[in-house]
Image (cartoon, rainbow, N blue to C red):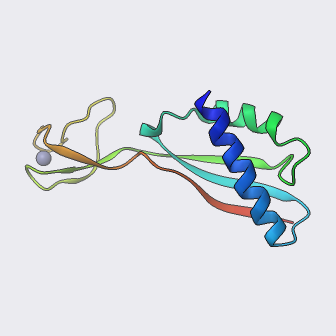
Amino acid sequence: MHELSVTQNIIKISSEEALKHNASKVKEIRIKVGELSGLIPSCIQYYFDIASQGTPVEGALLNIEKIPIAISCSNCNYEGNIKEKSYNCPVCESYNVKIIRGNEFLIDSLEVD
Ligand SMILES: [Zn+2]
């Protein structure tokens, strides 16, 4: 049910933005979702279609971009993406790493009419 509250948030924020810009219709909402956030884009879309009915964002296209996980290695100072399904450094294989990207969830932009 995590996606439902996230989706309600998207609708609330986007609707407020649309009103601020006197937009009658929101055509597209671009969202960035980190791979680590655990959010499933198809679930967000599903809830969006239901929960947006009667709001200014009803019928808007959800454009969900996945952000890959990136780490910073304390051992060799590598910074960047990791190999799929592994959480260690791809250069020196150390597990002494910090996650610097992949947890985010944000609304990138809105396209309005
Ligand atoms: Zn390393």
Which residue sits at x=57%, y=32%? 40
For residue 36, what is the image quadrant? top left
Instruction: Identify the residue at the far bottom of this view.
Output: 21
Which residue sits at x=28%, y=42%? 82
Which residue sits at x=71%, y=43%? 8
Residue 65 in percent (x, y) is at 57, 48
For the N terminus, give its image quadrant. top right
Which residue sits at x=47%, y=39%? 37
Residue 62 as seen in the image, left or right of residue 69 = right
Residue 108 in percent (x, y) is at 60, 60
Vertical order, 85 against 68 (above or below): above
Residue 90 as seen in the image, left or right of residue 17 = left
For the C terminus, give its image quadrant. bottom right
Which of 8/57 is in front?
Answer: 8
Vertical order, 65 against 26 (above or below): above
Residue 43 as seen in the image, left or right of residue 111 = left
Which of 5/97 is in front?
Answer: 5
Vertical order, 112 against 86 (above or below): below
Residue 31 in percent (x, y) is at 61, 51
Residue 85 in percent (x, y) is at 32, 29
For residue 5, what is the image quadrant? top right
